[in-house]
Amino acid sequence: MFLKKAFWFTITLLCPEYVVWIAFEQWQRARRYREVQKLGYDDWTMQHGFYIDMGCFQVELKGKSASLPAGKENRDIIELEDGFRFTIRLEDLISLIKADLLSAPDINTHDLEERNKNDQFARVITSLQVLYFVFQFFGRLGYHLPISTLELSTIAFVCSAVLIEYFWWDKPLGLRTGTVLKLDPEKNERFISMFPKLRFDTPEQNLAEWGKCDFALFFDRLKESDINTQLAYGLLTAVVINGIHISAWNNSFPSETEQLLWQITSTGACGAIVLLWVGTNIRAKSIRLIICYLSTMLYWICRVYLLIAVFVGLRSVPESLYQTMSWQDVLPGV
């Protein structure tokens, strides 16, 4: 669990808009809980949609079959001594309910809240801190006071965090247990016939599982041809988030070289995102892979430099950066 969190921390630090994109995808899929409601489960909520799509619902099938894979390299398919256990996502559950093979898992909202590790009080405190920072940031702009590159970079992360928090507001956090339902043996053959239509081993769920903290899978996820639409949706968000750094174009830097490097890397990060999107739309596989890898590496090089520069640049800043606004002395800071 520690390695998984450390992996996602690194991804968020280097590529926050990717996490926004993943959160948006999961939010879209979780909204399909309304389809389960229409099938007779009126008590289902958005939390249930996230719970199922997080891989917390498994179906156990007794008996072996040559039509089913061994599942040694697929964490969503576990081979047992006398059968298989499958992790069912929300869209799979909807299909299986319609086929009269399964019923929705019997878990209420209270049970989900008990398993959820989210602390609502901590969320409120964090939100107040973020609001205070944003209020202070725009207040300095209003008083024509200088803004440090560290503050600009923080605002970019705040934009990402706000979007992620919005999309994941109803998502349970830190679940360690799930729900297992045993399939009626009489329905085995029908289940096996539907098996090719089910979605297993989703990249966003298994990207950083134990033993699979592999950045190569991250690259594979970026260059998939079936995500062009999602990349197009995320293009504007990514450019806006990285474009915030471009606003420091004429800031005061310790040296002209550092200012030039900031200008190059801030625009390079935005250009790399556009290049990545263009690359995914090229039909020639070899060219597509080259462009995707080069654009991703260019983006990460720019991001790493920007992360380092915001701290290195603090060694020499204008004196007015430490000037506070009159109303700021009245408001308490946390």
Image: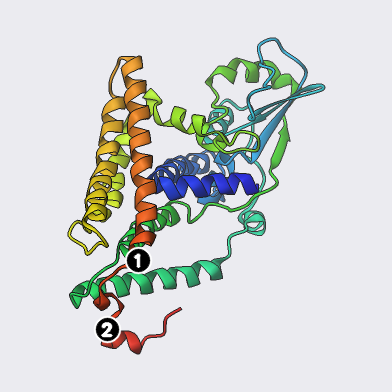
Residue drawn at 66 percent across, 55 percent down: 115
The residue tagged 1 is 314
- Where residue 205 sits, quadrant-wise, is top right
* Horizontal side of residue 229 vs 211, given as left or right: left
Label placed on residue 325? 2
Mark 1 → mark 2, Cα distance in angstroms: 20 Å
- Where residue 139 sits, quadrant-wise, is bottom left
The three-letter amino acid code for the residue at tag 2 is Met
Image coordinates of residue 12 in percent, x first then y, are 45, 48
SS at circle 2: loop
Residue drawn at 37 percent across, 28 percent down: 293
Image coordinates of residue 282 in percent, x first then y, are 28, 20
Residue drawn at 61 percent across, 27 percent down: 100
- Dot 1: few (<14), some (14–19), or many (≥20) neighbours within 10 Å? some
SS at circle 1: helix
- 233 to 59, vertically: above or below: below
